[in-house]
Image: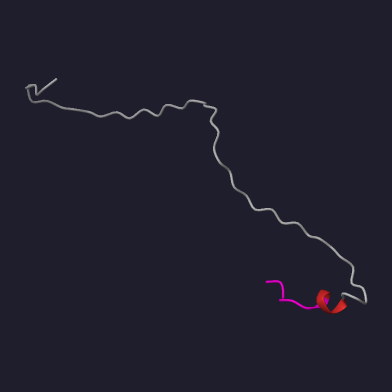
């Protein structure tokens, strides 16, 4: 195109927002927590009651 000379004047910039619906596959990562319950018995009582506190 090159450079063009114009008479002095006013310039106005207008912004338009265009919204379009698209279908696109994106990676989604989430954390899941599962609570597993095991009853304490005489054979596993010590290990069932030991461990760090929940924080």
Residue sitting nearer the eye, 13 or 54: 54
- Left or right of 1 on screen, residue 25: right
- Is 4 rendered above or below residue 27? above
Magenta region, residue range: 49-55
Task: Provide residue 55's location: percent of width, then percent of height.
Answer: 67, 71
**What residue is shown at x 71% (from left), y 56% (from top)?**
33
53 to the left or right of 36: left
Question: Considering the image in quadrants, where does the N terminus appear?
Answer: top left
- Residue at the extreme front: 43
Give the image location of residue 45, x and y in percent: 87, 77
Q: Is residue 36 magenta?
A: no
Task: Based on the picture, tell me whether residue 50 belongs to the magenta stretch.
Answer: yes
What residue is at 78 percent from the left and 60 percent from the top?
Answer: 35
Q: Main secondary structure of the magenta part?
A: loop
Residue 47 locus on image (x, y percent)? 81, 76
- Residue positioned 11% across, 25% down in the render: 9
């Amino acid at each position: 195109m090159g450079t063009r000379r114009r008479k002095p004047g006013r310039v106005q910039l207008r912004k338009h927002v265009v919204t379009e619906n698209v279908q696109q596959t994106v990676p989604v990562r989430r954390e899941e927590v599962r609570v597993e319950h095991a009853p304490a018995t005489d054979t596993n009582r010590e290990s069932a009651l030991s461990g760090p506190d929940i924080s």
